[in-house]
């Protein structure tokens, strides 16, 4: 099972990687961010929107956040303006970090029951598995966005967790 410290580390990593990814994406013209690139969520912008949409969806289940509008197919259009999307991403990352700081082993060991719009049924699973999915989902789609940004001609900053986070500052 994962630990609260692992969750804090992943939340910090998520926030830092999003800062780096959005900084790289900001170097591109808006048309390049919105260009259809054959990715699962179409464009760089669409992929970044989906990632925020997924975080909001899971955090609505874990911490009572307002859920995003329903429908994964609609997620690439979550926020139209890039600056607004970037600000929403930064706010969500800060909230995820604050939430991760409150986690306990007992909470992680418990179960969560939710209605899955994707599966159209009620589901139940261990929270630690679902929190692992939250962070894995972030990494997966950030990797896609990283590749799309690189293909568009901008090289995002390094992504190596052991060398980019100040674990002492995190108390880890």
Image: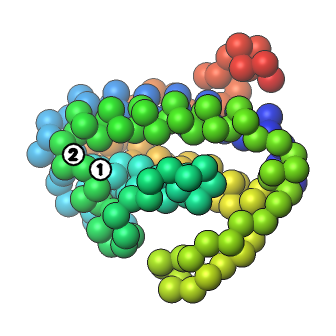
Q: Distance between the residues labelled 2 and 1?
A: 5 Å
Q: Which residue is drawn at 59% across and 59% down?
A: 61
| Position in image of residue 93 (x %, y %) | 50, 35
Q: Which residue is drawn at 70% across and 27% down?
A: 162
Q: Is residue 10 visible?
A: yes
Q: Is residue 39 visible?
A: no
Q: How crowded is mark 1: few (under 14 residues within 10 Å), some or many (20 or more)?
A: many
Tell which residue pokes out farthest to the left in this image. 31
Above or below, comparing residue 77 to residue 27 in the picture: below
Apparent side of residue 85 relative to residue 64 in the rendered image (left or right): left
Label at residue 44: 1
Contact, CB < 8 Å: mark 2 with mark 1? yes
Q: Residue at x 68, y 38 (%)?
A: 100
Please state, as top left, top right, bottom left or bottom right, where the N terminus lies in the image. bottom right
| Position in image of residue 114 (x %, y %) | 61, 72
Q: Which residue is drawn at 20% across and 60% down?
A: 36
Between residue 15 and residue 36, name the one nearer to us. 15
What residue does disc 2 label?
33
Please state, as top left, top right, bottom left or bottom right, where the C terminus lies in the image. top right
């Amino acid at each position: 099972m994962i630990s609260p410290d692992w969750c804090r580390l992943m939340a910090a990593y998520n926030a830092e990687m999003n800062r780096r990814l959005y900084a790289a994406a900001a170097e591109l013209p808006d048309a390049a961010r919105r260009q259809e690139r054959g990715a699962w969520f179409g464009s760089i912008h669409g992929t970044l929107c989906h990632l925020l949409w997924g975080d909001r969806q899971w955090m609505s289940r874990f911490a009572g956040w307002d859920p995003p509008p329903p429908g994964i197919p609609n997620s690439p259009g979550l926020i139209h303006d890039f600056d607004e999307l970037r600000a929403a991403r930064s706010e969500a990352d800060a909230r995820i970090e604050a939430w991760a700081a409150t986690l306990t082993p007992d909470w992680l060991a418990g179960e969560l029951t939710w209605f899955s719009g994707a599966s159209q049924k009620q589901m139940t699973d261990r929270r630690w598995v679902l929190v692992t999915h939250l962070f894995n989902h972030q990494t997966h789609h950030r990797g896609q966005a990283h590749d799309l940004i690189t293909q568009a001609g901008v090289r995002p900053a390094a992504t190596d967790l052991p060398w980019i986070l100040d674990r002492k500052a995190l108390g880890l």
